[in-house]
Image: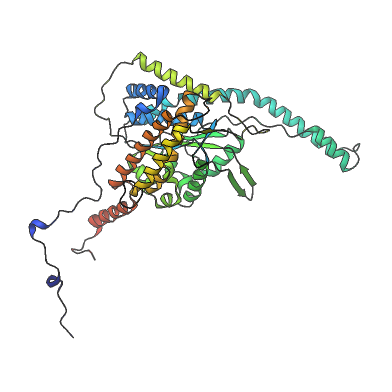
Amino acid sequence: MENPVKISEVVQEPAPEQIEIPRPLMRELPDADPFPTEELGEVLRPAAIAIQETTQAPLAMCGQSVLATATLATQGHANVTLPTGQSKPVSENFLTIGGSGERKSAVDNEAGWPIRKHEENLREKYDSELPDYLNRKEVWEKERQNILGSKKLQGMTEKREALENLGHEPIPPLIPMLTSPDPTFEGLAKLFASGHPSLGLFTAEGGMFIGGHGMTQENKLKTATGLSCLWDGDPIRRVRAGDGATTLPGRRLSLNLMVQPDVASVMLSDRVLLDQGLLSRVLVTAPSSSVGRRRFQEQNPESEAAIRRYGSVLLRILETSPSMKKGKQNELAPRCLPLSPDARILWIKFANYTEGQMAPGGEFEPIRGLANKLPEHATRLAGVLALTDNLNTAVIEEEYLTKGIALAQHYAAEALRLFMGGRIDPDILLAQKTLDWLNSNWLEPIIS
């Protein structure tokens, strides 16, 4: 048997000056991509700036919040029509990353007041309608029992005719909720069945949802699939032993989650959510911290006026009844909102550019899932901006698609920044977890 070859004879040890110092797995993040606030339009842009002046939170957080609120307000009124011929909701899923003390709740409070005011109005209406409904329901049930037990009505024919004359059971008023912070998907489906058809999963404490029952290991895939289907505009389909089969078309849902960085990493690096496709339907912004640079300043009357105007516009949209399917009180029938000819040409150019950047070695290769939907995201955002400025608009003009593309590019830049820093790469996070364990628990001199 030949003598074994020593590794040192095959592999030359590098000279000391050639030895590369190990680089950290988790790299320092470059500065955040500036949020394109100027693209938000004449209603949302001044409001975002005013909320930033009032709260001194990062501007991106304020811009994201007013955009999410506008999305919830407009999503029931129209769908966008892509050049591919597909009709898609304007609904979006927003995720804002901010550490402790970034005043997420303050921003949410300022941006979300049109929603809370509309919910208050809905509760007043519900409280006034509920007693009448209960009375009518009790009378209807009593009359139905009398018909079924009547000895004067002979045979099935007479009883059936009497039941037809009685009419359908009275319909209850809709549950006066527009937002929920941490629902399970089953709970969300039940709310869609008995509540309003346009809802939002909005919370300044996004960890409640990400760490809640709906995102546990056994429920995560089901929740992600349901949220993705709603984003796509598909009906909710459920079959349960107790409830039977349920189909709920014409429903819309938007998300606006504000989360701590560590909580965001849990969600954005989750292999199940990556493979299922939910994360390609989420728009993330992670602004640089403003903590330590905030100084007290007096309230600016112009800021108050901008927030009031923003609130009045969105409240008016929320109070405008969207089109419903005939005979339904909570099944939306949104009109279609196509691109203008010039906007269509711009969309095709952007779609072709995005496709090219997804190729191996392209800029968008690391975020291919999101990039694949970037033209659709841009169109949805353009639709929200157009509807906010004019709820009765018939088309999306080129100027709005230009704004939507600028916003979509911001979200692509943020996704790339987080990915390249290792913050949302599941393999890097797993390697870091392994390295941390080795440093704290492995006592041997050599790692086998």
At 69% across and 25% down in the image, what residue appears? 132
Is the residue 47 above or below the residue 339 in the image? above
Q: Is residue 12 visible?
A: yes
Q: How is the image coloured?
A: rainbow
At 41% across and 50% down in the image, what residue appears? 274
Q: Position of residue 112 (x, y in %)?
A: 45, 27
Is 261 left or right of 19, judged from the image as shown? right
Q: Position of residue 201 (x, y in %)?
A: 48, 36
Q: Is residue 243 visible?
A: no
Rendered image quadrant of residue 288: top left
Q: Position of residue 120 (x, y in %)?
A: 53, 24
Is the residue 57 above or below the residue 234 in the image? above
Q: Is 227 or 250 nearer to us in this picture? A: 250
Q: Quadrant of the C terminus?
A: bottom left
At 39% across and 32% down in the image, what residue appears? 402
Is 110 left or right of 73, judged from the image as shown? left
At 63% across and 45% down in the image, what residue appears? 246
Q: Position of residue 136 (x, y in %)?
A: 73, 28
